């Protein structure tokens, strides 16, 4: 504490990059706040966190105590999460832990938010967007971003940052120095919300993909072995309907129980896929229709900010890069969800018609109730076409993020959706 401030900041920041234990960090921070001049602890931590994020956070001694899942949490996150966690490098783990330096006291909350955004931008820029295969299992950067948001960063980070910024304005007026302004915190809050929405959307897409590939749309029924629309199937369905109308009481009861069990099986698998699709659709749309445009307003570079000008400039460039890579990816993932679910629903409906003839189509309302998907695959193909309205809207500036190749691919998908809608509903698309 007796060193000149520039030297103190340099020396102590370097020392803190090697401090990882949570309890030891809290003790060191208390001593810094006791012995350093007011505000110096924050200056030191700002440099410490950035050193750990920018320089990779490599430590020759490793991180044996920085486990992501401990004891009772294993059940909560499951074996798959433990397997995914093994993909994370010590550097990734160290970077996530670095931001926690700024999460111990309220005065540091605005800077915690800014540094969280810094790390999230880095991770999302490294995540896959051109080829989205097996989700997090082949995309360590995406998994790292999710882990950081759900297990490292306090859930009330944005609220704490906004509250602290307001407190500092009330206490120091407009002449305050060395802290982030209210406008900067609001800008960082909007950025954080956009980045979090994207990670949530990608996770929801992975969940849908897992469900749609593991749940069969077909159920075992007496007529399942017959080809749909075959003479044998039509005869079997007519005989079943006739037996239900004129057969014995026992036969009618047996047929009703068979039908009830069939609908129960269909409802179970149908709602499983429908719920996953609806969640993925809603979260992907939340990115595309993000208020003001997803990362569309990065703010201006200011010489008066406590954030270095080079870092501000890099932030603007990274946000522009994220728009051009993530927004087309989000549009194509949304199309995959709608188109993939529609194809699944076609097989689902064919299976019902194979078992119960024309009555199979009317079963959709019994299975799904008043849900939109009860309208059949045509509703989902029509929803694919509706994506074009969102992309064309000036409100969200999505077209600016599409290059020529992206736009050609998108136009091709819309043409395919028109054909599928006509085929599935015999409608002429508007």
Image (cartoon, rainbow, N blue to C red):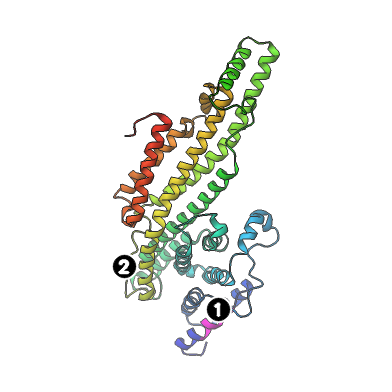
Mark 2 and mark 1 residues within 8 Å of each other at the beta carbon: no
Q: Which sits in the foreground, 396 or 205?
A: 205
- Magenta span dominant secondary structure: helix
Q: Which sits in the foreground, 63 or 110?
A: 63
Task: Please identify the quadrant where the C terminus is shown.
Answer: top left
When the figure is inspected, residue 74 is found, relative to residue 363, above or below; the finding is below
Q: Which residue is mark 2?
A: 300
Residue 95 in which image quadrant: bottom right
Q: Which residue is mark 1?
A: 17
Alpha-carbon distance for marks 2 and 1? 30 Å
As helix, strand or loop, the secondary structure at mark 2 comes to: loop
As helix, strand or loop, the secondary structure at mark 1 comes to: loop
Q: How dense is the environment of label 2, judged by Cα within 10 Å: few (below 14), some, or many (20 and up)?
A: few
Q: How dense is the environment of label 1, judged by Cα within 10 Å: few (below 14), some, or many (20 and up)?
A: many
Q: Position of residue 72 (x, y in %)?
A: 70, 58
Left or right relative to 65: residue 422: left
| Residue at the limit of the structure toward the front, as seen here | 231
Q: Indicate yes or no whether the magenta region holds residue 16.
A: yes
When the figure is inspected, residue 70 is found, relative to residue 388, above or below; the finding is below
Q: Which sits in the foreground, 147 or 126?
A: 126
Q: Residue at x 58, y 61 (%)?
A: 151
Residue 19 in which image quadrant: bottom right
| Residue at the limit of the structure toward the bottom, as seen here | 3
Mark nearer the N terminus (2 vs 1): 1
Q: Position of residue 271 (x, y in %)?
A: 56, 36
Q: Indicate yes or no whether the magenta region holds residue 96.
A: no
Q: Which residues are magenta?
A: 11-18
Q: Residue at x 33, y 65 (%)?
A: 299
When the figure is inspected, residue 38 is found, relative to residue 259, above or below; the finding is below
Q: Position of residue 427 (x, y in %)?
A: 37, 29
Left or right relative to 134: residue 399: left
Q: Which sits in the foreground, 196 or 232?
A: 232
């Amino acid at each position: 504490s007796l060193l000149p401030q520039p030297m103190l900041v340099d020396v102590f920041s370097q020392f803190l990059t090697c401090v990882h234990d949570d309890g030891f960090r809290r003790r060191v921070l208390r001593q810094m706040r006791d012995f350093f001049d007011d505000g110096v602890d924050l200056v030191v931590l700002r440099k410490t966190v950035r050193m750990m994020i920018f320089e990779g956070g490599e430590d020759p001694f490793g991180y044996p105590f920085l486990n992501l899942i401990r004891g009772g949490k294993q059940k909560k996150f499951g074996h798959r999460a433990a397997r995914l966690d093994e993909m994370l490098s010590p550097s990734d783990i160290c970077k996530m832990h670095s931001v926690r330096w700024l999460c111990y006291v309220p005065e540091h909350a605005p800077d915690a938010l800014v540094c969280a955004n810094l790390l999230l931008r880095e991770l999302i820029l490294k995540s896959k967007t051109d080829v989205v295969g097996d989700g997090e299992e082949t995309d360590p950067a995406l998994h790292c971003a999710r882990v950081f948001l759900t297990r490292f960063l306090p859930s009330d980070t944005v609220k704490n940052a906004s509250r602290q910024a307001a407190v500092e304005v009330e206490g120091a007026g407009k002449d305050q120095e060395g802290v982030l302004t209210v406008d900067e915190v609001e800008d960082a809050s909007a950025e954080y919300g956009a980045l979090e929405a994207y990670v949530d959307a990608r996770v929801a897409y992975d969940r849908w993909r897992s469900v749609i590939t593991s749940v069969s749309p077909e159920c075992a029924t007496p007529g399942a072995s017959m080809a749909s629309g075959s003479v044998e199937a039509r005869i079997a369905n007519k005989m079943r309907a006739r037996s239900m109308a004129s057969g014995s009481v026992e036969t009618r009861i047996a047929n009703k129980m068979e039908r009830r069990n069939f609908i129960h099986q269909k409802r179970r698998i149908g709602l499983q896929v429908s719920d996953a699709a609806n969640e993925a659709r809603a979260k992907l749309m939340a990115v595309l229709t993000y208020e003001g445009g997803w990362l569309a307003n990065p703010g201006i570079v200011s010489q008066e900010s406590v954030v270095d000008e080079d870092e501000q400039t890099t932030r603007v460039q990274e946000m522009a890069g994220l728009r051009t890579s993530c927004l087309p990816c989000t549009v194509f993932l949304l199309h995959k969800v709608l188109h993939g679910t529609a194809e699944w629903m076609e097989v689902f409906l064919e299976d019902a018609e194979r078992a119960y003839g024309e009555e199979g189509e009317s079963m959709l309302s019994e299975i799904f109730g008043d849900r939109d998907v009860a309208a059949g695959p045509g509703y989902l193909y029509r929803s694919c076409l509706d994506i074009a309205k969102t992309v064309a809207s000036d409100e969200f500036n999505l077209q600016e993020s599409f290059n020529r190749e992206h736009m050609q691919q998108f136009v091709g998908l819309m043409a395919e959706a028109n054909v599928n809608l006509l085929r599935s509903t015999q409608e002429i698309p508007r």
